[in-house]
Image (spheres, rainbow, N blue to C red):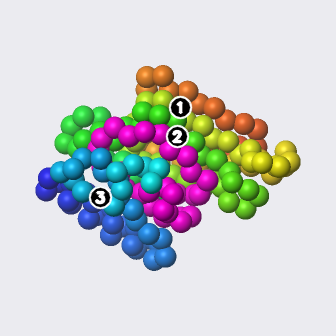
């Protein structure tokens, strides 16, 4: 518990220093570890672009975001910290010509199902279906994970993932 509090304190301090206007939201589905939300989707719905979502270890349903958000999970392997795993599709999409999940980041999350990066939106023309600058770092993709994306993608980065 002491390590968890230290980790969360460091993450919060770092986020405050990097973006004074962004808000941090917490997600936990463990009654012993209270947070603002019990599902990732509820936190995504409440968040504004550039906000950060801190997710405690646990198993969560998939989510859809059309905002550039930063997702921090607790761990991808059992050890000192509980594993944060998504057991449903994670969709990084586009709402319209100006609002999308481009610029999103995911750190320390185990994706057990699909990851979908989709720039299509209602009424879009081919040149508008652009998604870019999405980073997955220290994430794990396992089980039946699939990747689904469309034309118009650029700068999708994976660092230290497996």
Q: Residue at x 24, y 57 (%)?
A: 34
| Percent coordinates x, y for residue 133 in the rendering | 62, 52
| Percent coordinates x, y for residue 4 in the rendering | 21, 54
Q: Residue at x 53, y 31 (%)?
A: 114
Residue that badge 1 annotates: 114
Asked where in the image residue 95 lies, by quadrant, the reply is bottom right
Does the segment drawn in magenta span residue 62?
A: yes
Residue that badge 2 annotates: 90
Does the segment drawn in magenta span residue 115?
A: no
Residue that badge 3 annotates: 35
- The boundaries of the magenta stretch are 43-69
Tell me, yes or no, whether the two marked residues, 1 and 2, touch with CB atoms within 8 Å: yes
Residue 162 seen anywhere in this rendered image of the structure: no
Q: Residue at x 67, y 42 (%)?
A: 118
Q: Secondary structure at mark 1?
A: loop
Callout 3: 10 Å neighbours few (<14), some, many (20+)? some
| Percent coordinates x, y for residue 107 in the rendering | 42, 48
């Amino acid at each position: 518990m002491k390590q968890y509090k230290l980790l969360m304190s460091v993450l919060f301090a770092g986020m405050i220093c990097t973006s004074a206007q962004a808000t941090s939201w917490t997600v936990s589905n463990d009654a012993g570890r209270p947070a603002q939300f019990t599902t990732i989707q509820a936190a995504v719905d409440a968040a504004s672009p550039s906000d950060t979502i801190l997710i405690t270890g646990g198993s969560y349903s998939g989510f859809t975001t059309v905002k550039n958000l930063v997702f921090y999970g607790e761990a991808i392997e059992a050890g000192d910290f509980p594993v944060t795993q998504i057991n449903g599709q994670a969709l990084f999409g586009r709402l319209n010509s100006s609002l999308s999940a481009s610029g999103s980041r995911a750190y320390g999350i185990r994706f057990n199902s699909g990851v979908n990066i989709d720039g299509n939106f209602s009424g879009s023309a081919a040149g508008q279906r652009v998604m870019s600058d999405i980073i997955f770092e220290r994430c794990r993709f396992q089980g039946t994970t699939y990747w689904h994306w469309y034309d118009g993608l650029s700068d999708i980065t994976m660092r230290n993932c497996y």
